[in-house]
Amino acid sequence: MSRGTATDLVYLIAIVGFILALKGLSSPRRARIGNLAGAAGMLLAVAWTFSLPGVYAHEHNLLLMIIAIVAGVAIGIPAARLVKMTAMPQMVAIFNGVGGGAAALVSITEFLAIGGKSIAVYKIFEVLFGVLVGSVSFAGSAIAFAKLQELMTGRPITYPAQQPVNALVGAGILAIAIATLVTASTPLLVALLVLSLVLGVIFVLPIGGADVPVLISLLNSFTGLAVAASGFTLNSDLLIVAGTLVGASGMLLTRMMSQAMGRSLPNILFSAFGSVVTASGGESLGDRSVRSGTSDDIGVLLAYARKVAIVPGYGLAVAQAQHTARELAEALAARGVEVYYAIHPVAGRMPGHMNVLLAEANVPYDQLLEMDEANPQMATTDVALVVGANDVVNPAAKTTPGSPIYGMPIINADQAGNVVFLKRSMRPGFAGIDNELLYDPKTTLLFGDAKDSLTKLVAAVGSA
């Protein structure tokens, strides 16, 4: 077997590993195996690449590659092991941005390597595409990280003449790209790089914090496309396939998240352009009274129920209360109560985020019901226990056309016999609107930190 054939075979095995990784990550039960399959495929591809003769043609380059790998391992392993589950979206953002920046640098490096020679127009186009999309992904992901990490305001940032400025930057990029195709000029390529970075920043600034996870998914898709473009530039089938997989899966995830929020992607990306958007959704409910209860009263209600739905939200993740939620479910199950978790696709900011959080706490997979599975059971559920969620159970999504969340599919907690909210305060969720369900006569509120409240409920159920 020739070395070329062996290389193709090894890269094909690596590609299969990537595909198996995506398949495995579609389910919490197989996510760990899928992740390992993808990592094994990448390790195989990198190791085989080092065996190719051209790698050792320049010892200086080999040294730089080894330094880069060591630096990446030194940063990546601690970051992945120490990151909190609540900070997972911003870690995805920054890692994704690094991938986009790397794809842009690869395209630029290849352009410089063949500079001065007769460059085919299609090769220049591949380079331009990789630089443009990779740079937008890098700069945009950096701003998205800063918003989610609260290094800057999470609100939409707008300024006068924003749309004309965006149009001017876009027109400049188009003009420079055309000129570069004609002249193959390196200075023009650098100018395109700078404008692409600017475009990435101004593209993300007007997007509010609650919409940033959707943006991260879209930028992830951009990174995949940039990697695929660099694969064409380097004549690497492995990069082409890997980039296409990331691009396609990222776009599908973006579409899923948009549907889960009941909004179109253009609305999410451009709704804040030209003005500062403030959430409004009809009559303010802030002056109306609510019914609050004690942990002992709610513990008795839960203990003598037949079926209980736990509706987790971002507040549960912030309080790191997933283990305590499992303890409550186990205490209820010991009394013969049927318990399930009703999970909204964006309850943890990103699809699958809440599933992973609960799976990490050893919650049985068969108790994790997606929204479409959970909603039909709500009408026969005695108690819906909403832990740190607000917008994903807000009936305004179905009843108030003027609401920012109108049309968003929600968990139908309002159909349960009783509703219990565990909340820190009466502050609204990400959408910035009140939840009329809080004022429903069948709703009881238990104020406090979600973990502390759940701990008290576990004790109350045990003594009921």
Image: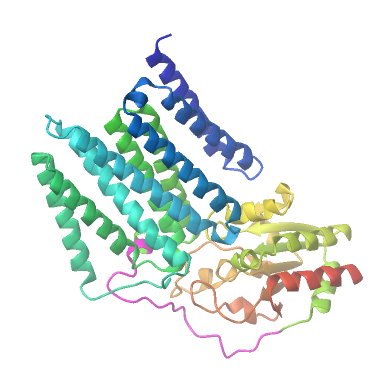
Q: State which quadrant residue 186 falls in.
A: top left
User: Which span of residues is magenta-colored?
Assistant: 268-291
Q: For residue 282: magenta?
A: yes
Q: State which quadrant residue 410 falls in.
A: bottom right
Residues 48 and 227: in front is 48
In the image, taking residue 105 as reference, residue 389 lies left or right, namely right
Q: Is residue 298 above or below residue 53?
A: below
Q: State which quadrant residue 106 falls in.
A: top left
Please count the marks in the image: 0
Q: Residue at x 48, y 66 (%)?
A: 149
Residues 269 and 95: in front is 95
Residue 81: image location, x then y, percent: 60, 51
Q: Tell me the quadrant of the picture where the N terminus can be found.
A: top left
Residue 153: image location, x then y, percent: 42, 73
Residue 130: image location, x then y, percent: 28, 42
Farthest-out residue, top: 1
Visible residue check, residue 163: yes
Q: How is the image coloured?
A: rainbow
Residue 185: image location, x then y, percent: 11, 43
Q: For residue 56: magenta?
A: no
Q: Residue at x 64, y 45 (%)?
A: 28
Q: Is residue 163 above or below residue 73?
A: below
Visible residue check, residue 263: no
Q: Residue at x 24, y 41 (%)?
A: 108
Q: Is residue 208 above or below residue 39?
A: below
Q: Tell me the quadrant of the picture where the C terminus can be found.
A: bottom right
